[in-house]
Image: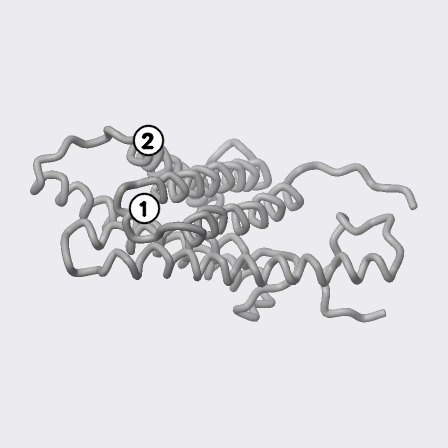
Amino acid sequence: MPSDVEYSPVGEGLGMRDFWLYVWLRRAALIAAHVSGLALTLIISVPSRPGTSLFSWHPLCMSVAYCLCMTEGILLFSAEGTIFCLKSRKNKIRFHWLCQALALIAAAVGLSFILASKNVSELPHLVSWHSLLGSCTLAASLLQAACGICVIFHNQLHLSPSPARLRLYHATCGLVVYLLSTATVMLAMFSDWFQATVKGVAWWVFAVVPLFPALVAMNQITNAYLPRKKMSS
């Protein structure tokens, strides 16, 4: 029977009715991950009032980098489809590269603004868990980008690891980066700036929002790259 849903080995062993329920639940989770990624970007960037200070650009740039661009760059490879209606894998890879490049650019700009803000205010650097974990996230982002470059230019660089192994390294680095960025975003919500802006029940709601796209992305990457044994019906 023809279907617009790509086959996923995760659904093996399920009855047809249960399988379609499973597929639509995964689609709903994917849509919710897109929405929560965009919502998280707005939640962090709007209260910062970009342009009011050097620091105000830091939350905006970092949320655009990791909550929006990196999230979309990962989710577009989902088997349930993507909001960008990209069918060709080649087009998905190109859009993935675009998202990741924008994420790195936005992260670099955000880093420059926080460094400039602390220098102007004569405040010390790397004194909070948020800043320390953020530094690890940026370092892991560069490693992930390097793995991606090795995948694309495998033949030109004459690398010994196979393209499949390099793709596994790249996906693993991407998963680590996304989990680190999620933890960094959650730590930012414990900062004096965010707690002074968002209070009460709203703060608790916003604090758990980063977990949802992270779970969806983690599930997508592990399902795509972890080895599976064929399930018997």
Residue 233 lies left or right of residue 2; in this view the side is: right
39 vs 222, nearest the viewer: 39
113 vs 50, nearest the viewer: 50
Mark 2 closeness class: few <14, some 14–19, many ≥20 residues within 10 Å = few
* Amino acid tagged 2: Trp
Residue 103 on image: x %, y %: 36, 52
* Amino acid tagged 1: Gln
Q: In this view, does 90 lie above or below 109?
A: below
Quickly name the residue at label 2.
129
Quickly name the residue at label 1.
195
Residue 173 on image: x %, y %: 48, 37
Q: Residue 207 carries which label?
A: none
- Is label 1 in a helix, a strand or a loop? helix
Q: Can residue 142 be seen in this view?
A: no
Residue 131 on image: x %, y %: 29, 35
Q: Is residue 126 above or below residue 96?
A: above
Can you name the residue that lies furthest to the front here? 200
The quadrant where residue 50 appears: bottom left
